[in-house]
Image (cartoon, helix red, strand yellow):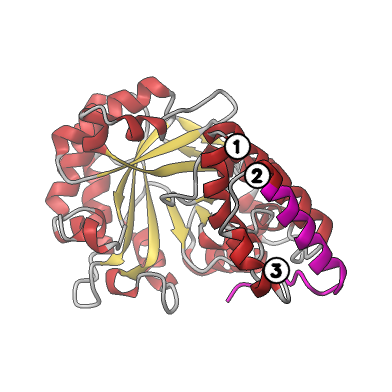
Amino acid sequence: MDSPAYTKIHTPLSIGSLCVPNRVFTAPVAGISDSAYRSIVRSFGCGLCWSELIMARGITEKNEKTFDLLKIDSADRPIVVQLGGGEPSFFAQAARTARGYGADAIDINCGCPVPKMVKRGYGVGLMKEPDTIAAIVESVKKAVDIPVTVKIRAGFSREHPDAVTVAKQAEQAGADAITVHGRYRDDFFRGHSNWDVIAEVKKAVSIPVIGNGDITTAQDAYDMIAHTGCDAVMAGRSTFGRPWLIREILNGSEPDHSVSLLLETIGRHAQLLMDVHGEHQGCLKLRTILMYYTKGIKHIKALRPEIIKIETAADFQSIRDAIERLCSGDTGAHSGTRP
């Protein structure tokens, strides 16, 4: 493939002092983007991974479960640790701790639309307070010697399309990059991502802008770059159960619906989850992950009650064999499509 967008994707990108080999990234998603997921997407060529959302206050209060999310090994780098909350002082302390655990950059979550976050003024709720975002960025920049980025949405609401304002203030406060998801808070993940907003932010700031939202194919990634001028693309939900999308974007290839790829990836992901979390907890997480991997498989509905009962490695192997039988019974069983 020969296009400006394709060439751009393969060009290294500097985010502050951090240089990454390509411009295809994966999004931070609570409960999904753990070290097992990151290992899988890295194997398909992901240029930069984000951690799950980690609450800054949980780190400062030394919450054990929060610290589990901070475990980073040498193979899990470069990595951006995303922090959530609303108090600048907590962010500074949490960022220092994350830096000590191996974070290569810190990301400030200003985009999560979940009600319990927004009610407290966290996540996308922060977009109503650009001065607070700027204060958080300033406090983190003073606390650590690694890049600081901010992830935002198009705005809190259509009545408050604040992306450009927030991005400019974040840049002035010292942010090294901005990620823009083109939906508003009330959209959650419904409808379409407004790429025009990403383009507006790109025109308004001089730091790298990462586009996010509605990248479900390689062509979507190229189209987003062409439409917005963004410096990198971030794929999120479309990689759940289809992490090879990263490789398709990098290679400019058509979607891979092969059963062998599906089964091989499921097997690796399952083993990683059990290695990271232990057999029991790994299998509990695997229940959710397999729901994503098996979307589009004909007749999978009959198997779902068994998937949500997985408790052991042996249970998983039985499910894996059943998935193979379903796919083998119909060459088009694994469509790879997403609703």
Type of amino acid at the residue the image marks with label 3: Gly
Q: Nearer the viewer, mark 2 or mark 3?
A: 2
Query: Is 100 located above or below residue 124 in the figure?
Result: above
Q: What residue sits 64% from the left and 74% below the top?
A: 301
Corner quadrant of residue 138:
top left
Q: What kind of element bears circle 2? A: helix
Cα separation between marks 1 and 2:
6 Å
Q: Which residues are magenta?
A: 315-339
Q: What kind of element bears circle 1? A: helix
Give the image location of residue 338, x and y in percent. Answer: 61, 72
Which residue is under mark 3?
Answer: 336
Tell me the quadrant of the picture where the C terminus can be found: bottom right
How busy is the neighbourhood of tag 2: few (under 14 within 10 Å), some, or many (20 plus)? Answer: many
* Marks 1 and 2 close (CB-CB < 8 Å): yes
Corner quadrant of residue 107:
top left
Which residue is under mark 1?
Answer: 274
Cα separation between marks 2 and 3:
19 Å
* Marks 3 and 1 close (CB-CB < 8 Å): no
How busy is the neighbourhood of tag 3: few (under 14 within 10 Å), some, or many (20 plus)? Answer: some
